[in-house]
Amino acid sequence: MSFTVVESVADFNHLTANYPREVRDLHPLAPELPSAPELEDGSRALPLMAIQVRVLPNTGFCIGVIFHHAVVDGRAFYHFMKSWASICRTGGFLEEPKPLHSRVEVEDIYGLEKHFLEWWNWELKEGMGRKPNHQILNDNVQATITFKPNPNSKPKELGFSPI
């Protein structure tokens, strides 16, 4: 895992505003996965995650995270982040049961592992984890849309059921 702390001169108010912004302004907030170094036996060590904290002096900070989807999916990563936040908030105690991220319990009855490993090796050779071409970023904008509750309406609880 790669962990980087970067100081930035970006305008925090511009980055968090509720209007369209150029994607290239937001691009530096996302970390890059390091390249996969070759080991002594010729294999490669696949970088699984990179975290970047970008400090915007006197205004705030941004935590950017990138992870390899062959190792964890969005739901498992969400559980990881939620557990980490819970531990930080409570001083070391989880407020909810620990999520199970072990793949040992999954039986590969169709023999898919070899196909996933072939894909994984192809990804390593093609330089996965790279950021998109900056030329592409120049033609895109991103907007933040904030939904505010109606002050006259009663708050609603959102319920989620496990799958």
Image (cartoon, grey):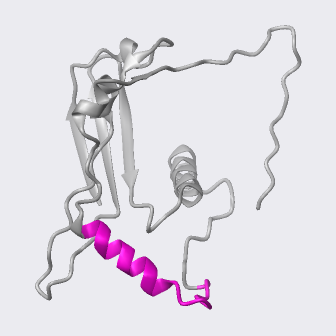
Q: Where is residue 122 in the image (x, y as percent from the top left)?
A: 30, 71
Q: Where is residue 25 in the image (x, y as percent from the top left)?
A: 30, 23
Magenta span contains residue 117:
yes
Q: Position of residue 37 (x, y in %)?
A: 16, 70
Q: Which of 96 and 19 is in front in this view?
A: 19
Above or below: residue 115 compared with residue 76: below
Q: Which of 54 and 147 is in front in this view?
A: 147
Q: Nearer the viewer, residue 7 or 163?
A: 163
The boundaries of the magenta stretch are 105-124
Task: State which quadrant residue 101 falls in.
Answer: bottom right
Residue furthest out toward the left: 40
Task: State which quadrant residue 47 falls in.
Answer: bottom left
Q: Residue at x 56, y 52 (%)?
A: 78
The image quadrant where one finds the N terminus is: bottom left
Q: Residue at x 37, y 32 (%)?
A: 62
Q: Magenta region, mostly helix, strand or loop?
A: helix
The image quadrant where one finds the C terminus is: bottom right
Please indicate whether residue 42 sits to the left or right of residue 80 in the image.
Answer: left
Please indicate whether residue 54 sits to the left or right of residue 90 in the image.
Answer: left
Task: State which quadrant residue 48 falls in.
Answer: bottom left
Above or below: residue 132 compared with residue 75: above
Magenta span contains residue 63:
no
Q: Position of residue 95 (x, y in %)?
A: 66, 53
Please indicate whether residue 18 sits to the left or right of residue 68 in the image.
Answer: right
Residue furthest out toward the top: 152
What is the number of callouts on the image?
0
Q: Residue at x 39, y 56 (%)?
A: 67
Please indicate whether residue 70 sits to the left or right of residue 92 in the image.
Answer: left
